[in-house]
Image (cartoon, rainbow, N blue to C red):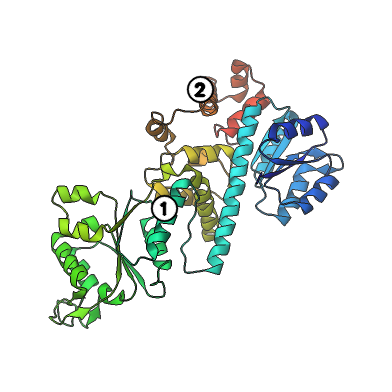
Amino acid sequence: MLPKILVVDDDRYTRTLLEHLLAKTADVRLAADGDEARRLFSANDFNLVLMDQRLPGDNGIELTREFRAQRPKLVVILMTGFADVRDAVAAMREGLFDYQTKPFEDLEALEAVIGKALELDRAYREIDGLRQQLGADASLPPVVGHSPAMERLLAQARQVAGLDTTVLLEGESGTGKDLTARLIHAWSARAAKPCLEVNCGGLAESLLESLLFGYEKGAFTGASQATPGYFEKAHGGTLFLDEIADMSPKLQSSLLHVLQDHQFTRVGSTALRKTDFRLICATNRLLADEVKAGRFREDLFYRINVVALRLPPLRARQADILPLATHFLEYFNAKFGRECGPFTPAAVELLEAGAWPGNVRQLKHCVERVVALQPGGMIDAAHFAPLCDKSAAQTHDNAANPISYQDARADFEREYLRGILETAKGNVSEAARLSGIPRQNLYVRMKRWGIVTD
């Protein structure tokens, strides 16, 4: 289904231009004044509104406030004349996605901004759907993202969830192996029983042993009472061993015996105890390589490598970056009592182009830091620039994925504007004179790319 876009402008030429420009990609509705815009808005669920700042008998910014009072996450692009740029900048602080000056000089750039705005709307709707899903079933962990790579993983996870067999999750750090393990448990017949998680890389051997096996009173200094371990507590449920490759050789051998016989003894005891749990393991290394290097038992590898799922890195699921960032933005706004957002087009571009070597975990921490440091208002590329490494992503992807003409043009414009402003020693008026671009236009372009922020 095509997205719905409302164009509100009293200029017939602008309405016709936008209608023709978007005809193949959107269901476009046109309004020449505020009353017609209100009628259409009340009858349709629009994905985007393109709003003229000055309307007959109405003010576009006030009309936007009216619409956003009914739909707080409505994505709006303000259209304004050159003389109104300062007013438009002030309006951006109220949560508008972007503003475009008329007449439009670069229709490709306008289409790109509209595309980013529709991406943001899809992200908002996905998060709202996720919130409804969690309300219906609080046992499911939140899963954000519908990229092909993520859809494949979720389909595989759902398929193996009902098999009650051991699962090995492989993937880079920060890809969400713990969340996937909880999903498999929630979709399994063991969902009513506990799902216990242990990070094998974060504990000393003796502590990990007592945590897994439990111990009897007096088994060691400080053992003041008998304590069951996770092998017992996970009976009937699921045990998730994260970073299994970091487990010591001794505990690898002990774990193998437990998996073979479903029996174990507590530390300090000789009494055999039976247990029945499903094992899910995770690692950010290739266990086959660890076996070859002699760091991981081959027999244990074959025991846990029954069903292996490979989690995709964030760079392989670019379509999920904006929904994830939006999800984290809403979460940290609520946590810190902020009203930051939305992301500007330049911020969206920067986020989607990031290398994200730390994957989803790095993206989450990045958004957390930005929200923590911002009092509120829109989040621009300049807020993310010190935290995101776009060049790394380009270096990684250029050989396999040649850059598109549109992206190459955007990169050239951004670097050109940075260079011309540097030559002009930060003076926008001088940069406009050197470039031959009208100052108002130059300012808007620099603002779009996060080169200027005031």
- Res 60 quadrant in image: top right
Which of these two is toward me, 186 or 376? 186
The residue labelled by disc 2 is: 419
Q: Nearer the viewer, residue 76 or 179?
A: 179
Residue 197 in which image quadrant:
bottom left
Picture residue at 64% right of the left edge, 33% below the top: 111
Q: Answer left or right for 10 relative to 419.
A: right
Q: Is residue 254 visible?
A: yes
* Mark 2: amino acid: Gly
Say the numbered circle drawn on residue 374: none
Find residue 153 and name its label: 1
* Dot placed on the residue nearer the N-terminal end, 1 or 2: 1
- Which residue is pictured at 19% across the width and 75% down the height? 263
Select label 1 or label 2 by which is in front. 1
Q: Is residue 86 above or below residue 174?
A: above
Residue 51 horizontal side relative to residue 180, left or right: right
Q: Is residue 160 above or below residue 43?
A: below
Q: Which amino acid, mark 1?
A: Leu
Q: Position of residue 373 (x, y in %)?
A: 50, 49
The quarter of the picture where the C terminus appears is top right
User: Is residue 377 visible to us here?
Assistant: no
Q: Residue 88 location, x and y as percent?
A: 70, 38
Q: Secondary structure at mark 1?
A: helix
Picture coordinates of residue 151, whole percent (x, y): 46, 51
Q: Is residue 317 left or right of residue 31?
A: left
**Secondary structure beneath label 2:** helix
Q: Nearer the viewer, residue 347 or 297?
A: 297
Relative to residue 446, is residue 17 drawn left or right? right
